Image (tube, grey):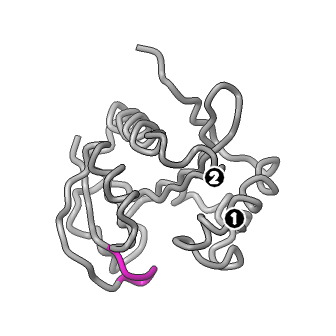
Amino acid sequence: MRDAYLVRPMTRDDLALVRGWREQAHVRRWWGDPEVEPEDEKLSDPRIAMWVVEEGGRPFAFIQDYAVHAWSPHPFDYLPAGARGMDVYIGEADMLGLGHGARFVRQHVDRLFAQGVPAMGIDPNPDNAAARRAFEKAGFVFVSGPQDTPWGRAVLMDRRA
C-alpha cells in the first residue's frame, strides 16, 4: 500500500516554514514560545529526528521523534531500549480537524516499527482533547493520567510494535 503522506527529513531550508508554523496561535497554544527549543538548535542533535509532512506536495505538519533513553530521567523511562518519543503538530490551520493527524502519526510510527523501534511514547497536554483523540486513533493507549513532566503537564500514551 502506498503511503498517504510524504514524511521527509527536515532540513535547514525548512527552518523558515517551521518557524512560521510555531508562531501560529493554534501551535503556540500547545507548543509555547517558538524561542523555546528552537528547531535550528535541534537539527544537529543526533538524539532527535525531525520531519516535515506533506500531502500532495504541500507541507503542512511537523514531527520530531527522539531517543527517550537519551534524557534521564524521562517520563518514558519504562519503555524498552530503543523506544522513541514523538511530538507532532499540524502547522497549516486549514488542515486541522480533517483526520490528518491520526493518519500521518500512524504512518510514521508504522515505518519506525518496521525499522525495529520496539515502542513509541507520546505525551499530549491533558487539555488537548483533539490530539488525544488523534493519538488514540493512531493506536496509542493511555498509560497515565495527567502529570507534570520537565516539558509541561501531560498524559502519557504509548504504542508497542
Give me the residue at 63% from left, 41% from top: 9
Which image quarter holds the C terminus? top left
Tally of numbered discs: 2
Q: Earlier in the sequence, mark 1 or mark 2?
A: 1
**Quarter holding the N terminus?**
top left
Judging by the rendered image, the residue that carries numbered circle 2 is 93
The residue positioned 33% from the left and 59% from the top of the image is 132
Q: Amino acid at mark 1?
A: Gln
Asked if residue 47 lies left or right of residue 132, the reply is: right
Q: Position of residue 46 (x, y in %)?
A: 57, 57
**Numbered label attached to residue 147:** none
Q: Is residue 21 above or below residue 145?
A: above
Image quadrant where residue 60 sits: top right
- The answer to which of 76 and 101 lies nearer the viewer is 101
Quarter of the image for residue 71 reads bottom left
Q: Which residues are magenta?
A: 149-154
Residue 20 appears left or right of 99? right
Q: Main secondary structure of the magenta part?
A: strand
Q: At numbered mark 2, what does the secondary structure look like: helix, strand or loop?
A: helix
- Whether residue 150 appears in magenta in the rendering, the answer is yes
Type of the residue with mark 2: Ala
Q: Could you tell whether 51 is left or right of 137 in the image?
A: right
Q: Which residue is mark 1?
A: 24
